[in-house]
Structure formats: structure tokens, C-alpha cells
Amino acid sequence: MRAFKDAFRSPFSRAFAALVFVVLLGLIFNADGAFFRWDTHRDMFRHIAVFGVIACGMTLVIITAGIDLSVGSVLGFTAVLFSILSLQRAWPPWLAIPGCLIAGVLCGLTSGGLIARFKIQPFIATLAMMVFARGLAKWVSGGQKISTAVLQPDGTYKYMDVSPVFKALNSRILNGNIAVVTLIFLACVLICWVILTKLRWGRYLYAVGGNEEASRLSGVPVAATKLLAYGLSGFFAAVAGISQAAQELQGDPEAGATYELTAIAIVVIGGTSLMGGKGSMGLTFIGAMTIGYLEKILSINAVGEASRLMLTGAIIVGAVLFQMARKR
Amino acid sequence: MRRAPAAHRDRNVLHAEARGELTLDHAAVFTPAQIDDERDTERGKSAEAVGIRLTTAQQQFVEIIKAVTVKNAKIVIMDEPTSSLIKEETDKLFEIIRELKKRGISVIYISHRLDEVTDIADRISVFRDGKNRGTLERGEFDRTRIITLMVGHAVESAAKPTITRQRIVFEIKSLSIRKRIKDFNLKLYEGEILGIAGLRGSGKSELFNGLFGTYGNAVRGSARLDGRPFRIASPKHSIKQGLALQTNDRKETGLVPGMNIIRNITLSSLKAFSPGGWLRYNEEIKAARKQMKEMGIKASSPEQEVKTLSGGNQQKVVLAKWLVTQPRVLLLDEPTLGVDVGAKHDIYALMNDLTAQGLAILLVTSELPELLAMSDRIIALHRGRVQAEFSRAEATQENVIQAAMGERSN
């Protein structure tokens, strides 16, 4: 019993236990064997990739004891921007992709600047950015979905070619076994892991989240650290936006609504504390799989949307209570 | 003592009283005004009204009374009960403890304040490193015997090597900080400990924070450190120029409690451990182990979170953090606050070692004997101005206090 308790002391093993629990649910409610098929798992990873990418940036922000509510809107804005640039303006990908990433970073830096320079609470500053970026998405798109069909002055539609970059991002490799967006997600996890564990700035993120005033008095560049966190959050939101546009073959100005909540759920279910100063990419990765499997299991069992939402809410609470049990 | 919401706690006591169980002297707990309030209104309603106005001391008294009446406790354990009490309240607490004793209730009283335990205890057990190092009966114990058990060896009061003033390390000219410090001038010599005496509100902490750049550049005046102009802009700049500040509140402004010892020790010199931005954790571990050994930081591992360390060890971690930055001048604000006797003497020894190596220290402490024992020179601050300066030979408790209170000597 003692050994059992000790095994569940580390946040990592607790996050893992929550994942195992969800997978066990899948083994029981396997929808006539659907859960045992490889493509179910492949689709889960593909489905969770966009959420996982924004959860990467969210992890960095939450470690600084902040929150970024704007990621869903920034995703929508960059998805629209990317579609306009590559589908309608025919920009080459090497221009369109960096352009969208910069747009995302600028959104993040703006929230970060409001928080670091003007001491606006992260919740408020990013709430404002959430509304503002959604407005940007509607403004640049004129409120329309941006697809390959371009309205001509004479009222007819001209169909543009789908940009190869869309096809590439939406494809699978290794005989169709791994989606490119899944690889993008894994790359983002790796990048954030390197930042958090190997770089001085990663240490600063933890220090600022753990005790901001003590960090400042120890010479930590607190404002720059916060700018970095929110800037990177904007960057990953843009990566997610580009991936989303490629998957849907269009830029929807409504895309990404409520995605910030899923990203926060992923981070929290992994065991990263909203109090800041604690957490890791490994936890977020496990959290992404937990949420991913949860949604997959509910969908293969054809649970209706109403019950699905209620069950997801209940299971998130259960998992977080389990995470907190160690603190008693 | 766990703190339940005051109103809730209070209601319990009033219920006990209603059942006729509360027999301790009511007046010892509540001030007359509050008792009147209770009479004025209905009991149930007034419970919350009274609860809100209870001071920390009263809340603690209520807690004790609750323990022995409502819960019928035979043994009451008090862990540092006086940490937030003033003298009169402590006296009142002791009255209550003696009353409990008369009723046959045993009290285990945990404190780091020696005068309190010698005052109230019948027997004293001294704990060090998780072991009982000896139990003394009343009549056997005195300060020195307890301290010897706490430290593990006899302590001689730190003898102070006299220094020869040769080189000025830190020079401050007509410094003004936020209207709290006015026209402050100072010359600090190599290897010197300069004590700053002052009452609360005299501007001691503002002086340190202003110099260190906590307030940014909202500071007027000029300073030179090691012969170079010293620019006050931010803590980061000050650290780079060779200044370090140990603040008087290690939990709020000294440590990142959730990080481990290694990461706290290297926090203010992290650039040196991360060439090109890449952390070299092995070198961090090495530096931390060295500091832990030299300062005698006791922990199960260098990776232990600092919030789980004792006050003394936490303070040593703060000091270690600053020593790794290799400062020329160290600002110490209450270095022994909330620190056990053993660690206190370690810190004194460390200060003397550091000054022997040429470091200069500005010391603020509210413990006058400590100030007199450690300082080569003492200046008294009163309302942001230097009131008087004493050499080590001239300084006495009386004349330093008088100057700190604003009285002009001679």
C-alpha cells in the first residue's frame, strides 16, 4: 500500500494514471471493437493535434502563473489570414507561413505587453485580445469563410487551385499512418520541452511563476519573460491556425472558438497548476492524450453532443480532483 | 494552529458557553467592549459580529478554549503560538497556559524563543535535526545549556576582529529616496560591517531597497562602488555592479518557494551557468553543493524544495544565492529573523568570514545586541536622516536607542 502511494506521488505518474483510466474506459466501451483498431488511435492523434499545439503555448503561460484566453481567436485570425494569402493571393508558402506566424506573435506580444508593462491581469488582457482578434478575423475575411472559391465582379465564382502547402499539411506519411499535423504537434512539444528544461529563459518562466517579486529582486528580467511566454503562445496559436486552415481547406473566421478552454483543460488535466511555477511538457502531452482519448471514446460510442459535453466536464473535474489528492 | 473562519470558530465557543461548558475567564479573552456587544444583541447573530473583530491573539485564545472545552482535550500542543502576538498578548497567553495547568491539562509548547520557554516550561526538550538532544527539568535549564544542546557544541560569543580602514568600497553622496531617505551620505570601507540602527519607519528598508534599485531609478544622489560610478536602475543592474540585497522577508521576496535548493542558489547568477542561453545543470549542482557544504545547509538532497526547509536553512539558501553572484557589498536586512540559534551563529560566523575576505556589509537588524556585537561602526537613522554615528567602542544600547529615537546626543 505504501509503495502504491509513493508511486502516485509524482505529478507525472498521476497524469499517467488518469490517462490509463481513460484508456481502460475505452477498452470497456470499445464500440464493438472500434477502439482496438489502429485508425481510431491515429485519428485521435490527428484530431487532438491542433488543440495540443495551442496547449503547448498555454503551458508556458500557465507556468508563469498567467493565462491566455486569446489563443482560440488568434487561431481563427491566422487561419483566415493564411487562407487569404495562400488561396486567394497565391503567396508562396515561404512567405505566407512566416507572415501568419508573425501575426500570431504580434497578437501574443500585445497581450504580453499589456500584462508586463501596464500590469493588467492576464485574464483581462487576454480576454480583450480574444475579442479583438476575433474582430480582426472577421475584418480581414469580410465575415465570410475563405475558400478556393473567389467571387468575381460579375457575380460568378472562380475556383483557385488548392495550394500544395494545404495538401502537404493535410496529408499523412508512412503509408497514411501518421498525419503531418500530428508531427507538427510533436515538434511543438519538443520545442517547448527544450525551452522549459534546457534554456535559461525556461528557468525564468518557472521563477516568475513561482515568485515574481523574488525573481525580480534576483535580477530575473520579469517583463521580458512574460513577453516571451505570451509571444510564444501567440506563435503556437498561429501554428495551430495554419494547421486548422489546411485541414479544413478553408479559413473560417469563427474557427477556434472555445479552443482556449480545451487547451486549458489539457494543461490542467496533465497536472500543471494554475498557481504557476510548476508543470512540464510531459504532463501536457499526457493531458492532450487523455482529452483526445476521452473525446474519441465518446464519439465512437455515438454519445450525443449534450451528454458528451456533460460527461467531459465531469471527467475533467474527476481527473483534477485526482491530481489534487496528493495535497490532501 | 489551524485557522478556521473566525465567525465559525466563535460560534462554537458561544455554543459551548450556552451549554455551560465554557468556564475559563471570559474577560481574559474578550475586551469589555466586545462583551457588551454580545449582551446587546441576540447571541446567534452576535457571534459573527464579534468574530470579525477578533484579533489574531483573541482568535488563538478562542482556539485554545475550544480545544479544552468543546473538544475536551487533555493535551494541548501549541506550535509557535506567539509568532504574531505582542508582549501583552503573550503574557495573557501564559496566564491561560498556567490556568490550563491547574486544571490538569498538559501543554506541549513549541517555540524558538528561548525566554518564552524558560519562562513557561516545567521541562524542556531540545530538538535538533529531528532528534531529541536532551530534556532538562526546571532548575536545570538556563540559556547557555539550551543553546549548547541546540547548536551541538558550546558557543562562544562571536569575537570580532578589528579592521583597519583602508579602502573605500562603497560611497554614497546625498542620496534621497521617495521622501523616506533624505540627503544620505555614507562611506563603507573594505571588510567593514556597518550597522544601521533605526526604529520602524526610520527608512532602513527603504534605504536598502532604494540603493538596490527595487524602486527603479526613482532615487536621487550619486554612488560609487569599487571606484566606479554606481548606477541605480534595477536589481539586475545592481547585481551586475556587485551589490546584493538580502531582504527581510525571505518567503515573499527572497526565495522561489516551490523551486529546489539548486535553482534558488543559482537564480541571481544564472547567466554564468548558461553560456549562450543553454543551462549547464551539472555546474549548477556543483556550485550548489559547494555552498551547501560551506554554509552547512541541511537538506535531504540539493533537489529538495526550499519551502520544506527550516527557517535557518532557508535563510542560508538566500545568502548562498547572493554569494554566488560574488558581490563586493552585501546589504543584509534582518539576516537572523526567524532563524534558530544554531543557524544564527553560523550566519554570524559567515559574516565575519566574508568581511575577512574584504567584502563590505551594511547591516540592519532590530535586535540591538546583535547590531552592537557585529558592527564595526553604527549609524542611527531617524526619519530618513542620519542622526548620529558611533564607533564600535562608543556604541552602547542606550546611546544608540536614544539617537534612533531622534534625541541629539551632546
Image (cartoon, coloured by chain):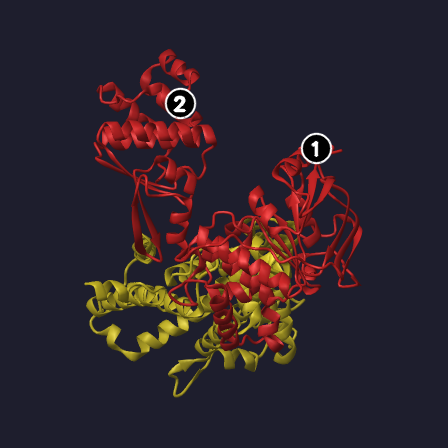
Chain colours: A yellow, B red
Q: Which mark is residue A5?
A: none
Name the quadrant containing residue B266.
Answer: bottom right
Q: Amino acid at mark 1?
A: Gly
Output the chain of dot 1: B
Identify which residue is drawn at 57% across, 79% down.
Answer: A163
Residue B266 placement, left or right of B136: right
User: Element type at marker 1?
Assistant: loop
Q: To which quarter of the image does residue A327 belong?
A: bottom left
Pointer 2: residues within 10 angstroms few (<14), some, or many (20+)? some
Query: Of residues B52 and B357, which is closer to you in this image?
Result: B357
Q: Amino acid at mark 2?
A: Val
Q: Is residue A231 visible?
A: no
The image quadrant where one finds the N terminus of chain B is top left
Estimate the x, y position of residue B155 in percent, counting from the top left.
Answer: 46, 54
Q: Can you give x and y, in whole percent of width and height, for residue A70 in the image?
A: 54, 57
Q: Position of residue B378 (x, y in %)?
A: 68, 46
Q: Is residue B389 left or right of A184 when viewed as pictured?
A: right
Reading the image, the residue beneath label 1 is B406
Q: Residue at x 76, y 61 (%)?
A: B166
* Depth check, front residue: A321 or B129: B129
Q: Classify mark 1: residues with Cα within 10 Å, few (<14), some (14-19) or many (20+).
A: many
Q: Secondary structure at mark 2?
A: helix
- Quadrant into which the C terminus of chain B falls: top right
- Are callouts 2 and 1 both on one chain? yes
Q: Is residue B374 visible?
A: yes
- Residue B50: which disc? 2
The chain letter for the residue carrying disc 2 is B
Residue A55 pos. (x, y %): 46, 65
